Image (cartoon, helix red, strand yellow):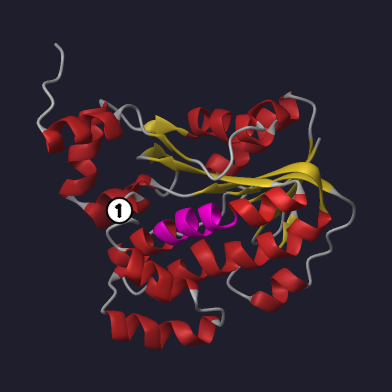
Amino acid sequence: MRVLITGIAHGIGKATAARLRADGAEIVGVDIGDGDWLACDLSHPEAIDALPLDGAFDALVNAAGLPPRPGSEAAVLNVNFLGLRRLTERVIPLMTTGGAIVSLASKAGAKWRENLDQVQRFITLTDPDALPGFIAAEGIDPVRSYDLSKEAVVVWSRAQTARLQKLGLRANTVSPAAVETRILDDFMTAFGDRASKGTALMGRAGTATEVAAVAAFLCHPESGWLKGVNLPVDGGLDARLDCLAFGIPEAE
């Protein structure tokens, strides 16, 4: 199996590469800066288009992403969705029959249904230069930019299901809650009580290795019947929030 992984230098991308290598996969990595990977800044469409992608791929893992920070709205929307989408479209023609696309979304994208109108307006954008105007018109702050970027990943990925079926491909998303990576502090700062309460309900943050196990599974042919699925990998957070929201008594 030959797999292309973005964001391979750190966190979930690095852990997924390690997991798949242990399974015997050949890994081609993409990240910024110098390293044992293809250098590419996903915020620049021309850099994505110029990536020297040789040969065929059995899977693509979109793990690169930016956290919410002050003034980061355009960068977050650009890298987390526009860049992800452009790279995916670049790779689709290179994928083997039965190939899998796995994109890292987030628990932060869980409210895509409630925000679908805005998500759909965002998805129509293709030019990063249009982002400042969109952000101003929509009143988007750093936290909303992150949530929206991940909502868009979920919605766009689900919308590709029929198209990819015809091509013999499939796409799924993975939505982790808080994960112990180098950018966890950024999330705790940006989300405040929302993050701390979620972590308290989970009992702890997850690890990159735990999320990587799910991403790797979605790359393998054994998961071939999973198509257009968004898998929460969240230590039970989704279940506990549902119990609280709907008044379901939790067993003790």
Q: Which residue is mark 1?
A: 111
In-image side of 169 versus 43 (left or right): right
Q: Which structural element holds mark 1?
A: loop
For the record, the magenta segment spans 151-160
Q: Viewer-proximal residue, 168 or 207?
A: 168
Give the crowd class for mark 1: few <14, some 14-19, many >=20 residues within 10 Å. few
Residue 250 on image: x %, y %: 14, 19
Queried whether the magenta region covers residue 159, the answer comes back as yes
Q: Which residue lies at the image location 50% right of the left edge and 62% below the top edge? A: 80
Image height of 229 relative to 122, above or below: above
Residue 93 in sight: yes
Q: Is residue 213 left or right of residue 204?
A: right
Query: Where residue 57 sits: x, y (%)?
Result: 81, 47
Reply yes or no: does residue 231 show up in magenta: no
The vertical placement of 23 against 49, above or below, is: above
Residue at the spot x=62%, y=36% of the render?
16
The image quarter in which residue 24 lies? top right
Q: Is residue 41 visible?
A: no
Q: Amino acid at mark 1?
A: Lys
